[in-house]
Image: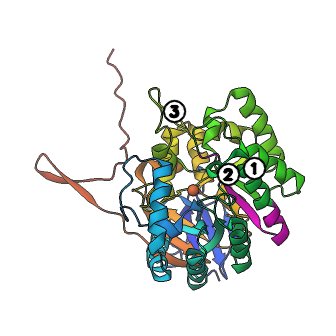
Amino acid sequence: MADLLIANARLPRNAGLSTVRIESGRIRDVTDQPERVAAGQALDAEGKLLTPALVEPHIHLDAVLTVGQPRHNLSGSLFEGIAIWGERVKSLSADDVHDRVAQVLRWQVANGVLFVRSHVDVCDPQLTALRAMLEVKREFADRIQLQLVAFPQQGIQSFPDGEALMRRAVELGADVVGGIPHFELTREYGEQSVKFAVALADEFGKQVDIHCDETDDEHSRFLEVLAAETIRLHMEGRVTASHTTAMHSYNNAYAGRLIVNLRRAGMQMVTNPLDNAVLQGRFDHYPIRRGHTRVKELLAAGVNVCLGHDSVMDPWYPLGKADPLQAAFTLAHYGQMSGYEEIRTLFDMITVNGARALGLPDYGLEPGCRANLVLFDAATESDAIRLMAPRRLVIRDGTIVARTEPARTVVNWEGRDEPVDFMPVPIKVRQPIG
Ligand code: FE2
């Protein structure tokens, strides 16, 4: 007897309907034909899209909901954002972090996000944010799975006792080692910081996730160092490069060679179109560069690329509601990924690609996988992104953990109330007469 039977579901990249049977919190089987099931025995997906739970591979939870504190980012630049955050962290407390993050974790579950990798600023001798986030991770473990990155926002070599703080953060329980080489005081410090981070992760058996070359400076080339260290220490598949916006400005010959080496290093890539759409190109005169990584070229070369939200209402990005669909919608435009297959790839980037980058076991729609699922109020990937479709159901280990009742919109049209759901009604094409 199934714990939950979902009939008439449309799975990603699948035109037909499927039935998903869940037992003991896991997917028992997926059958192609919609089953005839008696009312009340199954949950009828009504032909809507059912995907694995969404994965958020890159967010800064310790900074969420701090926009305007203590002041707004007037230039809109990355570096003014870092300066404002440097002021805000002085008033950081465990309760402050806990209460803001607890709100956004609720938003994420409501959006269907059940797996999150959060960077946490460790440029603080007390490690207040990290200690608070470790507590949050434990407190909410039965609702959302967190990976924490020891993230040196002010640099490793450029911040007093930076290396010791990173080591302490890993000893305290950080899952992943971070870095920010393009922000270090010198190029040499940047290289040193990458080598230190990869070696530290290797020593403790951790993963690596570096904020790498998040700048419009075509001379920022720490990604090649990260790839080389990954290969040298046999860390293939366990290392992530986030942002990598400078790749936009590299010459094609250099970028092409780099992408080959990223593939060889098994590098996991994260692009963050929401923040980088507003942060990059701030020092350009026209034409203003888009300044984001080469998503399509990386994917074409067989490199895993996933999609992050990065910020929710913080000094770098004042908008957002922790919904990966907003990031996917933005990348469809900003990364010119509006082709038929590309829209489906956007969905991979907020699900399976993110799961691969985070190394999540038992993830997906295959029999035996944990039943972590999202049912959208849209039939296709394209409509889900176009409409920012509500998540009708979010299911964690076979249990419904969030529900959304879609809004009902009515337009008064020629004296009558008529419902509008933004879905095209098939129109008969009139044949020309004669
Ligand atoms: Fe980031």
Q: Residue furthest left?
A: 415
Quadrant of ligand 1: it is bottom right
On the image, numbered disc 1 is attached to which residue?
191
Using the image, determine if residue 80 lies above or below residue 104: above
Using the image, determine if residue 217 lies above or below residue 345: above
Question: Marks 2 and 3: CB-CB under 8 Å?
Answer: no
**Circle nearer the N terminus (3, 1):** 1
Kind of residue sitting beneath label 1: Glu
- The N terminus lies in which quarter of the figure? bottom right
Q: Position of residue 63 (x, y in %)?
A: 49, 66
**Circle nearer the N terminus (2, 3):** 2
How far, Cα to Cα, is label 2 from label 3? 22 Å
Judge the density around disc 3: few (<14), some (14-19), many (≥20) Cα neighbours within 10 Å. some
On the image, numbered disc 3 is attached to which residue?
289
Question: Marks 2 and 1: CB-CB under 8 Å?
Answer: yes
Using the image, determine if residue 398 lies above or below residue 242: below
Which one is in front, 395 or 54?
Answer: 54
Q: Give the magenta range.
A: 199-214
Q: Is residue 300 left or right of residue 290?
A: right
Using the image, determine if residue 26 lies above or below residue 345: below
Seen at 45% across and 69% down, the residue is 107
Please say whether residue 36 is visible from this viewpoint.
no
Seen at 44% across and 61% down, the residue is 314
Q: Position of residue 185 (x, y in %)?
A: 64, 50
The label number, if any, that marks residue 181 in the structure image: 2
Question: Marks 3 and 1: CB-CB under 8 Å?
Answer: no
Kind of residue sitting beneath label 2: Pro
Q: Secondary structure at mark 2?
A: helix
Tell how many labels.
3
Q: Is residue 206 magenta?
A: yes
